[in-house]
Image (cartoon, rainbow, N blue to C red):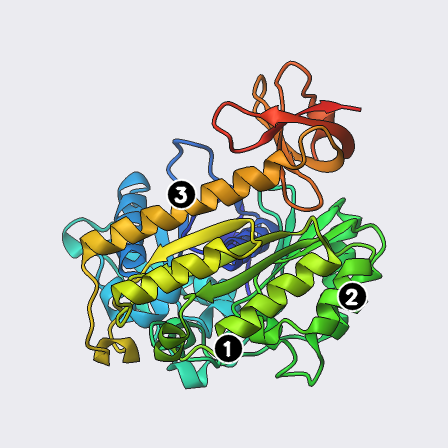
Amino acid sequence: MIDSSAFQGKSAAYYTLGCKLNFSETSTFGQMLQEMGVRTASKGEHADICLINTCSVTEVADHKCRQAIHRMVRQHPGAFVVVTGCYAQLEAETVSQIEGVDLVLGSNEKANLIQFLSEAWNRRESEKTGERGEQGAMHEFHAVEKARDITSFAPSCSRGNRTRYFLKVQDGCNYYCTYCTIPFARGFSRNPSIASLVEQAEWAAREGGKEIVLTGVNIGDFGRTTGERFLDLVKALDGVEGISRFRISSLEPDLLDDELVDYCAQSRAFMPHFHIPLQSGSDEVLRLMHRRYDKALFAHKINLIKDRMPHAFIGVDVMVGTRGERPELFEECFDFLNGLDVTQLHVFPYSERPGTAALRIPYVVSSAEKKARSKRLLDLSDEKTQAFYAAHIGSKAEVLFEKASRGRAMHGFTKNYVRVELPASIAREEYDNQLLNVRLGGFNHDKTALMATIE
């Protein structure tokens, strides 16, 4: 039994690194603490509790995690500091030795974060070791389970300070691509039932939510735990009254069923918006990565989506400079992407991760070459995104607007994820979380959105 009385009136500060799934989980942790009487700390206030949810997808991400932990400890002296997430799972001992960290929770433990926090908090209070000074930090370091032993699923459906809700439908991954540490950080693929996810979506609708993004590590693999199908989940969520929009955050190409594309094309609420990881447009590099598809299958999925939904937004993940990516293989990748009818490229320079199979591949791409290749792909992405946006100038669209600071322009997205800007002169506070019909004009000043007027 958790005694929440010790937390009444306390304040908490949160910091999240990484993916949408992490942001969703952090927001859920915040809700749970709020229910125990903990409020979110104001800007500049010294919080009583600090929670850092970490990422470990690249070496740069690891470095940012360490920086964030040190910064939070400095900004909130005396706070009870909790570190969780992928970096905490993979480098638990390292994190536990950082001055000021009290509690380190891996992927299995974070499902019971409130219980661990409550127990450690009460121990610290009873032992009267709150002051760190010469005594040093007290580390309530919990042993982190190995990846194969991670079996818990921490539900999450939250929006934090955003308009859209994020619904966690799956966790973990069974794919073990040669460059990736996520299966070691998140464990094997697992999921809750469709019925429980529908209940969470219905709760979001009662809270006033209008759009939900489905998140997870490998959400197309949904059903391993319950024997259900991702398509069945999509069909069930499509019937949730009150939710006008659903978006699918990311789907592996080999798990993107043709039947799913056909269903989304005629569904009530699933938007014409897809995000599909490619990683490389070279079959040789895909084999080195141990990806489960080839260029032909990927191109088929893109062409099918565009045939069924000509105005669909398609985002694509691309990894640049992985081991084995010789210059001619990168050129093959560039030409493949240049010829695809996709909207935006999310470009990630390859980062060497300890313990991954990719380290055994002999050909190494220099940092300078990675940077040059990334720039070429980012320039290509800008061309494709701006061409996609330009095709919508002058058209009408329905936009879900998000809250903006007083006197600032409002932003929102169309059904097919065109970013829209409403000038401050006509923006209204009551437009927040409202679906409004607009006419799309030209680009804003930095070409990141189309200007709009209310119809």
Q: Rate crowding at label 1 as few (under 14), some (14 to 19) or many (20 or more) other CA atoms within 10 Å.
A: some
Whether residue 255 is situated above or below residue 280 in the rendered picture: below
The structure residue drawn at horizontal position 65% and vertical position 37%, both measured from the top left corner, is 391
| Of the image marks 2 and 3, the number of the one nearer the N terminus | 2
Residue at the top extreme of this rendering: 425
Give SS at disc 1: loop
Q: Is 432 situated left or right of 186 in this image?
A: right
Name the kind of residue labelled 2 in the image: Tyr
Q: Is residue 154 visible?
A: no
Name the kind of residue labelled 1 in the image: Tyr
Q: Is 151 situated left or right of 424 in this image?
A: left
Q: Quadrant of residue 193?
A: bottom right
Residue 72: x percent and y percent?
Answer: 32, 45
Q: Nearer the viewer, mark 2 or mark 1?
A: 1
The structure residue drawn at horizontal position 57% and vertical position 76%, both measured from the top left corner, is 254
Whether residue 104 is situated above or below residue 360 in the rendered picture: above
Residue 110: x percent and y percent?
Answer: 47, 67
Residue 76: x percent and y percent?
Answer: 33, 42
Determine the CA span between mark 2 and mark 1: 22 Å
Tag shown at residue 263: 2
Tag shown at residue 430: none
> In the rendered image, which quarter contains the C terminus?
top right
Q: Which residue is mark 1?
A: 293
Tag shown at residue 379: 3
